[in-house]
Amino acid sequence: GGATVLIVGAGPAGLVLGNLLLAAGVDCLIVERSSRTHVERRARAGFLAEATVRVLVDNGLGTGLLARGTRHDTCVFRSEQGEFALRYGALGREEAHTVYPQQHLVADLVAEFLRRGGDLRFGTPVSEVGGLDGERPWLLAHREDGTPYRLTGRYVAGCDGRHGVCRRRVPADAARPHRRRHGVSWLALLVGTPPALPAVTYAVHDRGFAGHMARTPSVTRYYLQCEPGTDPASWSEAALWEELDLRMRAERFGPLRRGPVLERAVVDLESDVLDPMQYGRLFLAGDAAGLISPSAAKGANLAVMAAETLARGFTAAVHEGDEEPLARYSATCLPRIWRAQEFSHWMIGLLHAPAGDDEESRFLRALRDSRLENLRTSRAHQHAFADNYVGV
Ligand code: RFL
């Protein structure tokens, strides 16, 4: 069996690509390792930029996010010096975020793909990808009982996330990885309470960064910088709240809403770009092509934008015999990716500095404080911040 485009992975990248291909009349199928329930419950990102929302809405994929998403246009910074709000929706290009949990978006995209008659196989891990430098690339997929079977196509779209198989099949001399590990880790918490604060709030503290982000009317995300290698289970709930109160300066700015910690995970801040994002008949999109630190909430947005570019490329190749847009796929995506990387890297330096009492740590803390002060006081800087914060 097979299809013209074989898509590995039903995350935002694979599902947007699949939906756009079906709409364009390009034959495709999606194979996904996990169950439908699992992918529809996997809570991750929540902040969608206007460009992302436009791609989704223009392609008939925005009904859920328009009905249930909420508009966010302000972020707040807290530090020893006090608190200030940036109304980024009224700065720069005057764009806002739509907050819509990634798992809800994924559920909408799955439903729409199936409604359009798409072939989506859950519980189907891919163990091998091959024939990428020939005309008939293939996948080795596995049925639920483990039986392997081969799928053949004209193109493979590797949308299988950061630990997928597709990227590993790009020969080392065909693409160059660019990587930075930031030596910073965040404990990412989902808490079963309504947001305590009206805006995204970033707290800069010498004990480490803490953050608050809305998700739904009953769920809030908190981030707490922790030592790399921390076991997420090692914090008691009481200790988590005490540390959040301290770093968010609850005594000074008002209490947080305590509630059950529904999920906890440690995220190591890591940046990674593969150039090019393609090899022969294999095209990588989303986390499979690179990672971005969550400091500026760009990952899911970049995945959607890459999927849209890739869908155009496949459509031109299949319907018009024009391979040019596909050949340029990587070159089209990379400037956008690098711009997001540069901004999220800058944000890491805005939100973190080492705690030590050595001269370099002191230097980096002073830089961090000056960067924050510059953002607080310079209107020009605020406009540029807004363009980058919501832009992709
Ligand atoms: P995904 O969503 O990881 O989907 C990949 C899919 O591929 C499947 N898969 C396979 N299927 C078959 N065979 C195999 N061998 C396979 N290997 C893997 C997987 O099961 C999965 O379903 O990748 P995609 O589509 O590229 O989407 C990327 C986004 O999910 C990711 O960038 C964001 O979630 C990152 N991210 C955030 N991004 C934002 O824009 N804003 C945020 O606020 C934000 N917060 C976050 C985040 C990521 C987090 N993680 C990963 C822990 C918060 C967290 C905590």
Image (spheres, helix red, strand yellow):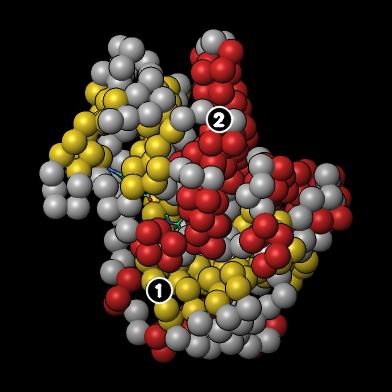
- 329 relative to 171 in the view: left or right: right
Residue 80 coordinates in the image, percent (x, y): 66, 72
User: Residue at the spot x=38%, y=29% of the render?
Assistant: 3
Q: Amino acid at mark 2?
A: Gly
Determine which of the numbered discs, if any, sits on residue 263 in the image.
1
Q: Quadrant of the N terminus?
A: top left
| In this view, 221 is above or below 99 | below
Q: Is residue 232 visible?
A: yes
Number of on-image labels? 2
Task: Determine crowd level at label 1: few under 14, some 14-19, many 20+ residues with C-alpha closer than 10 A.
Answer: few
Mark positioned earlier in the residue sequence (1 or 2):
2
Task: Determine crowd level at label 2: few under 14, some 14-19, many 20+ residues with C-alpha closer than 10 A.
Answer: few
- Label 1 to label 2, Cα distance in Å? 40 Å
Which residue is nearer to you in this view: 253 or 360?
253
Residue 2 coordinates in the image, percent (x, y): 32, 30
- 276 relative to 304 in the view: left or right: left
* Disc 2 secondary structure class: loop
Q: Amino acid at mark 1?
A: Glu
Answer with the quarter of the image where residue 276 lies: top left
User: Residue at the spot x=53%, y=88% of the render?
Assistant: 258
Which residue is nearer to you in this view: 142 or 93?
142
User: Residue at the spot x=14%, y=52% of the render?
Assistant: 145
Residue 359 coordinates in the image, percent (x, y): 48, 53
- CB of mark 1 within 8 Å of CB of mark 2? no
Residue 318 coordinates in the image, percent (x, y): 51, 18
Q: Which residue is mark 2?
A: 25
* Disc 1 secondary structure class: strand
Q: Is residue 357 visible?
A: no
Q: Quadrant of the C terminus?
A: top right
User: Residue at the spot x=76%, y=55% of the render?
Assistant: 96
- 297 relative to 35 in the view: left or right: right
